[in-house]
Every structure is written in structure tokens, then in C-alpha cells.
Image (spheres, rainbow, N blue to C red):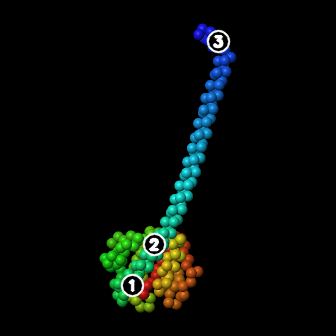
């Protein structure tokens, strides 16, 4: 034991080699910890990019589904109103349709005592008596805040049954204007669709 103490006190060569080796091991451990943190950071970055990509995919898919559902719901609502109010279109209002339960089971529409919110876009649907040739000869449906991506699919869905269609201020179908898909111009993601069914 005394011999070892003397060697350490005198700066034995073995002691300095041991100290250098311990120092290198310590530095290597710190360097490895840094590279592990970088690897974890890269894994988290890849996972974040994947989550953002999935969100964007499902969000766009959701808007497409909502658009298809709104087209179906508008067609269904128009059919119910036409068969129930035939010849009495002057009595058609959101309030009367709410009381009659016309908005029930229409997935893309949220009815709150006659105030109907639509998806996609969160706009409002207003149903009133319309004028095609004379007052009260049709039912007018007005959807506000319609996104651009929803315009063409919904217009295509309703154009067969509608007597008149206006998008924003442009008439794209009427008794005097033939339906032309080139006229379906939607801009600003806040479009107003008005159509009349007789």
C-alpha cells in the first residue's frame, strides 16, 4: 500500500495513463449523449411532419365528404318541400320548415329554431318563397359562405332540378339561360348560392 501511495505521489506513469483514459471515456460519454439527443430530435421532427400530413389529408377528405353530404341534403330537402308544399309555396319559411321537422336527419345542416347552419363553410341556409315568373311560384334556397371547393360539386348536384341558379351575382341557369358549367365561378371561399325549385 505504501508503495502505491509513493507511486501516486511521485506521478507514476500508470496513474497518468489511467487519468487520461478516464478523461477520454468521460468525453466520449458526453459526445454520445449529444448525438442521442439529436437522434431523438430527428425522430420527433419526422413524427411531427407525419402528423401534419395526416391532418391535412383527413381535413381535405372531410371537406369533400361534407360537400357531398350537403348536395344530397339540399336535394332531399327540396324534394320534401316540393311534395309537402305543392301549390302553397308562399307559406315556405325556415320557421315553418323547422316546425314541420324538415331539417331533421340532414347531417350537413344544423337547425337551431329555424336558423340553419351548413357544413362545409359554416354559412346559413335560408328557405323562402321565390319568384320565377310570378310571386310564390317556386321555393328559393340561399346558402351563404360556401367554400370554393364545394361550389362545383353542389351546383352539379342541384342543377338538374333547379329552375334558376345564381352563384354570387352570376346567373348560371334560368328559363332564359342554359346551364353552362363554364359559368360556375366561385371565388373568395365565401360564395353565395341561390337556387329556385318550382
Residue placed under numbered mark 3 in the picture:
7
- In depth, the one of 142 and 21 nearer the eye is 21
Residue placed under numbered mark 1 in the picture:
82
- In depth, the one of 67 and 137 nearer the eye is 67
Whether residues under marks 3 and 2 lie with C-beta atoms below 8 angstroms apart, the answer is: no
Judge left or right: residue 12 versus residue 100. Answer: right
- In depth, the one of 197 and 128 nearer the eye is 197
The answer to whether residue 146 shows anywhere in this view is no
Residue 2, given in percent of the width and then of the height, sits at 60, 8
3D distance between C-alphas at marks 3 and 2: 88 Å
The answer to whether residue 6 shows anywhere in this view is yes
3D distance between C-alphas at marks 1 and 3: 107 Å
Residue placed under numbered mark 2 in the picture:
69
Q: Earlier in the sequence, mark 1 or mark 2?
A: 2
Q: Earlier in the sequence, mark 3 or mark 2?
A: 3
Residue 153, given in percent of the width and then of the height, sits at 52, 75
The image quarter in which residue 143 lies: bottom left
Q: Secondary structure at mark 2?
A: helix
Crowdedness near tag 2: few (<14), some (14–19) or many (≥20) residues, C-alpha within 10 Å: some
Crowdedness near tag 3: few (<14), some (14–19) or many (≥20) residues, C-alpha within 10 Å: some
* Looking at the image, residue 48 lies above or below residue 140: above
Identify the residue shown where x is 37% and y is 85%. Answer: 83
Q: Secondary structure at mark 3?
A: helix
Identify the residue shown where x is 42% and y is 71%. Answer: 108
Residue 82, given in percent of the width and then of the height, sits at 39, 84
Amino acid at each position: 500500500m505504501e508503495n502505491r501511495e509513493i507511486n501516486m505521489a511521485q506521478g507514476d506513469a500508470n496513474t497518468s495513463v489511467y487519468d487520461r483514459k478516464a478523461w477520454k471515456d468521460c468525453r466520449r460519454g458526453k459526445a454520445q449523449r449529444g448525438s442521442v439527443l439529436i437522434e431523438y430530435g430527428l425522430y420527433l421532427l419526422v413524427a411531427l411532419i407525419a402528423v401534419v400530413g395526416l391532418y391535412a389529408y383527413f381535413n381535405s377528405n372531410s371537406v369533400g365528404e361534407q360537400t357531398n353530404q350537403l348536395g344530397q341534403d339540399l336535394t332531399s330537402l327540396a324534394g320534401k318541400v316540393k311534395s309537402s308544399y305543392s301549390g302553397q309555396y308562399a307559406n315556405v319559411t325556415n320557421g315553418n320548415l323547422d316546425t314541420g321537422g324538415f331539417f331533421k336527419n340532414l347531417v350537413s345542416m344544423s337547425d337551431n329554431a329555424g336558423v340553419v347552419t351548413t357544413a362545409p363553410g359554416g354559412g346559413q341556409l335560408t328557405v323562402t318563397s321565390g319568384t320565377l315568373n310570378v310571386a310564390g311560384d317556386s321555393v328559393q334556397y340561399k346558402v351563404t359562405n360556401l367554400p370554393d371547393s364545394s361550389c362545383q360539386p353542389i351546383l352539379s348536384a342541384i342543377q338538374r332540378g333547379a329552375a334558376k341558379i345564381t352563384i354570387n351575382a352570376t346567373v348560371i341557369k334560368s328559363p332564359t339561360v342554359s346551364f353552362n358549367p363554364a359559368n360556375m365561378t366561385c371565388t373568395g371561399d365565401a360564395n353565395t348560392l341561390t337556387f329556385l325549385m318550382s
